[in-house]
Image: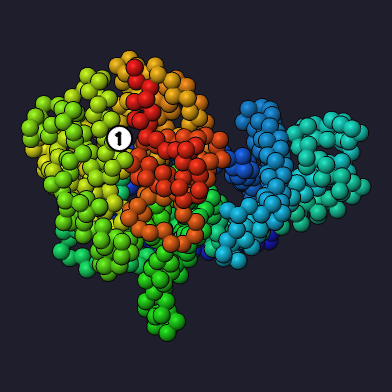
Amino acid sequence: MSTSSFILLLLIFISVGWFGYRVTQLLWVLRLGQPEDRFDNIAQRIMNVVIFVLGQRRVVKEISGWGHFFIFWGFVVIQIGALELFAQGFFRDFKYDKIAEELIGTPIIGEILYLIIDIICFIVLIALMIGLVRRYMLKPVRLEAKDPHAKVDATVIIILISLIILTLFGINGAELSEKLAEDNFSAIDRFNMIQIAGLRLDLFMPISSLFSYLFSGASHTTAESIRDVFWWIHIIIILGFLVYIPYSKHLHLLGAIPNVFFKSSKPVGELAQLDIDDEEAETFGAYRIEDFTWKQMLDLYACTECGRCQENCPAYLTDKPLSPKELIHDLKLNLLKRGLMLIEDEKERETDEAKEYLEKPLVDGILEEEAIWACTNCMNCQEHCPVFIEHVQKIIDIRRYQVLTEGKMATELQTTFTNMENNYNPYGFAFAARADWVTEDLGLKTLSEDSEVDYLYFVGCAASYDKRNQDIARLLVKILKKAGLKVGILGSEEACCGDSALRAGNEYLFQTLVTQNIETLNSYNVKKIITTCPHGFNVIKNEYPKYGGNYEVYHHIDLLANLIEEGKLTLTNPVNEKVAYHDSCFLGRYNEIYLAPRKILQAIPGIELVEMSKNHNKSICCGAGGSRMWIEEKIGKRINQYRTEDFKNSGANVVATACPFCMTMLSDGIVEIGLDENTYSAYDILELVDKALA
């Protein structure tokens, strides 16, 4: 073995060993997490990797993502070229074109591979330069970070990849220069010279050919020496890059693929169930980082810090102390520092500094309490995360600890919980008055009076007690009756669906309400349920099955769209309004109901449908989700006002909703930002349908 081969082998051994040691540390840190089964649906999980990692589907949804697409695939292609170069460290004449010629009698496959590598590397270099311009000149807010090391880290990575490409061009250019010095092209099969603008270029290495002109006039020996210098620099950078990755923000290069593979296969709206009957549990929820599951920890390794979660977060956009990106980043730093302390020798944890750090809880130690409670659970962060990080579950787990273990919550929530415990609704009205909204002309009965119905209408708390939403509930019953459908209600037997308790972290109260409702529903053998509240719709559809409540659940919007399409409802009266539809988070991102409400509005004569700037899966929350309906908004701009301004700027005079919370928040927003109530108004789609009915 030559000296250079021995040195290369030693460098590989050191680099791979160092890399392996760090990866082993990271895996041991993950083992600190709680167990979680993510090994179901293996075939689908593999397909997810193909679609979202190899295909970069979520990444390229934005124009800027195409730069990452080319960098990702360029990096893969570069490694193919690197394999040849590493092999040359032991077998100097190792070449893909020579192997191809030996195997199939022609070097063409190897030469095409060189062409692909050459062109892709050039494209990646351009993408990297654009990345530097964005980061240092355009400076999009989402790329900013409070951690000064993050920006340096990103720049180092860009520089390293650029150097890998430039040294590859240098290697190829020097080799071509060697051949030019030989002045005997016919003897070299792969040296396919063409003339372009007076330049002699290799057909299969056009970019590298341009680099060969840097060494024009060099002797064969000089060109060979230059090639060797570039080769060693290239190899050392790649090996250094290998070691650097697991210590840098680009740890996501290791974490992203497994994170996509292990992404949740449950419905978007389903949260992890908490075993509140566990008698051995000393605490509930997440107090420290090791209270999360291993998958929740893996999320932290996978974060690319791209900021897409942040730029779509209503809390962040309205100056709340919550940035989903920074939340994940802070948890990641805590995981790495605390995790490494916990897996190292016990003596390493005996210093005062280590003891002080290990005593830090997540809330008010690593994260701000206000940030945890600012989240509306709108799911915008998860909808746009390219590596499927699950932000909301982490926040819920932290809230669970705050509420169930420490009894910490906003004063308003304490009142809300008390109301739900005593009267089964967050408003505090008497549960016996739950059906007082029903008028005689509706002919509506409870299931205790008549259980033979097409659908049970699960009214929900808002439609039971809020005057405006009571009107909407009555309209629904009248419209369904007109379509020939018979519905019934539970009346005073109905309890709150439990969504607000669940989202606030009060799992005990949630499960109490769920159990009570399911017992009632099952006693009447209910099969089909319709709701007007997206929160009730989501929780009954996606959470109740875990507790034995399996039903066909419909939101009234989907049902209305079907009735109109089937001709059971005829819309002939013109409603001359310019309407913008507000996508409810729990209908849209949670349950992908985007088209039905728009189809209904488009079916109403006279309506001109326009879109707000943030619509469909980028729609901004009204501000009431995640139990925020019951907590006063004291920090930053009110989210409902932010959304109402978006409505105003759309040019519409009517904002259409399909959610009682959204109706309340947007109606208030119209008043709060000073819009003329004679010009601007909020309507439930049901009200617009009623105006148009023949």
Check the image and name the residue furthest to the bottom: 352
Could you tell me the amino acid type at mark 1? Ile
Badge 1 density bin: few <14, some 14–19, many ≥20, Cα 10 Å: many
Looking at the rendering, which quadrant does residue 587 occupy?
A: top left
Q: Would you say 121 lies left or right of 306 here?
A: right
| The C terminus, quarter of image | top left
Q: Nearer the viewer, residue 320 or 334?
A: 320
Q: Residue at x 66, y 54 (%)?
A: 139
User: Does residue 244 appear in this view?
Assistant: no
Q: How is the image coloured?
A: rainbow
Residue 284 location (% of width, % of height): 25, 63
| Residue bearing mark 1 | 472
Q: Residue at x 75, y 34 (%)?
A: 204
Left or right relative to 412: residue 127: right
Residue 381 in picture, x, y percent from top left:
46, 49
Residue at 58% x, 61% y is 145
Would residue 58 be found to the left or right of residue 2 on screen?
Answer: left
Asked if residue 402 is positioned above or below residue 235 in the image, the reply reads below
Q: Nearer the viewer, residue 507 or 274?
A: 507
Quadrant of the image occupied by residue 596: top left
The picture places residue 559, in percent across and down from the top left corner, at: 30, 26
* Mark 1 element type: helix
Q: Nearer the viewer, residue 152 or 686?
A: 686
Q: Is residue 524 visible?
A: yes
